[in-house]
Amino acid sequence: MNDEDDEYKLPRSTVSKIIRDYLPKQIRCSSQVKDILTECSTSFVKIVTSMALEICSDSNKKILQAEHIIQSIKSLGFESYLVELEKEKKEMEEKSKIKQVKKRANLKKNEGKSSKQLEEEQEKLFAQAMYLAYGISEDNENDNENENDNENDNDNDNENDNENENDNDNDNENDNENDNENLN
């Protein structure tokens, strides 16, 4: 097999999962069988797709639709798959409708809000996600920032104290030198 054919193979992990789902647990499948099933399923998908593309172009359509796949399955003589295909198609359409309804509801919910309000809501959602993912809330971050600020302030205070002490030491040395000069 050449590299181009390998590029268009079904993923072996997908084929392996399907095999596991359909075989009883006590039966195992050799890697040779998995390879053969991968080859066969890839060929099947290619044949059905090429037939569906022909049907699509014959009907002057530019987008491959589920109906084209169903027609190609019929014309290839795999009518026994049609019941399952129709069932999957209906489930897919229902999921798509639910997704569209949710999307419209979100658009209506956000309608009339300013971009500032939407940004604030987004920030809240990010904060919630951070809290759920890592247990970090904005309050914790602010507390940590305040603690860091306080530590920095203390460090600065200590540095200033040290500088003042050094200045005082220098002043004392200068005073002692002046006193010694005056005595002489």
Image: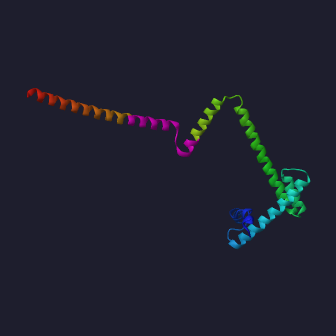
Q: Quadrant of residue 119?
A: top right
Q: Position of residue 141 (x, y in %)?
A: 49, 38
Residue range corresponding to the magenta coloring? 129-152
The answer to whether residue 149 is magenta is yes
Q: Where is residue 174 in the image (x, y as percent from the top left)?
A: 18, 30
Q: Where is residue 7 in the image (x, y as percent from the top left)?
A: 72, 62
Residue at position x 77%, y 46% in the image: 96
**Depth order, front residue of 117/160:** 160
Q: In this view, does 87 lie above or below 142?
A: below
Q: Is residue 171 left or right of residue 76?
A: left
Q: Which SS type dominates the magenta stretch? A: helix
Residue 103 seen in the current view: yes
Q: Is residue 126 left or right of residue 25?
A: left
**Depth order, front residue of 50/110:** 50
Q: Is residue 29 above or below residue 59?
A: below
Q: How many labels does the image show?
A: 0
Residue 27 seen in the current view: no
**Depth order, front residue of 161/20:** 161
Residue at position x 79%, y 47% in the image: 94
Q: Quadrant of the N terminus?
A: bottom right
The answer to whether residue 103 is magenta is no
Q: In this view, does 40 lie to the left or right of 164?
A: right
Residue at position x 83%, y 59% in the image: 49
Q: In which quarter of the image is the C terminus?
A: top left
Q: Position of residue 81 (x, y in %)?
A: 84, 61
Residue at position x 73%, y 36% in the image: 105
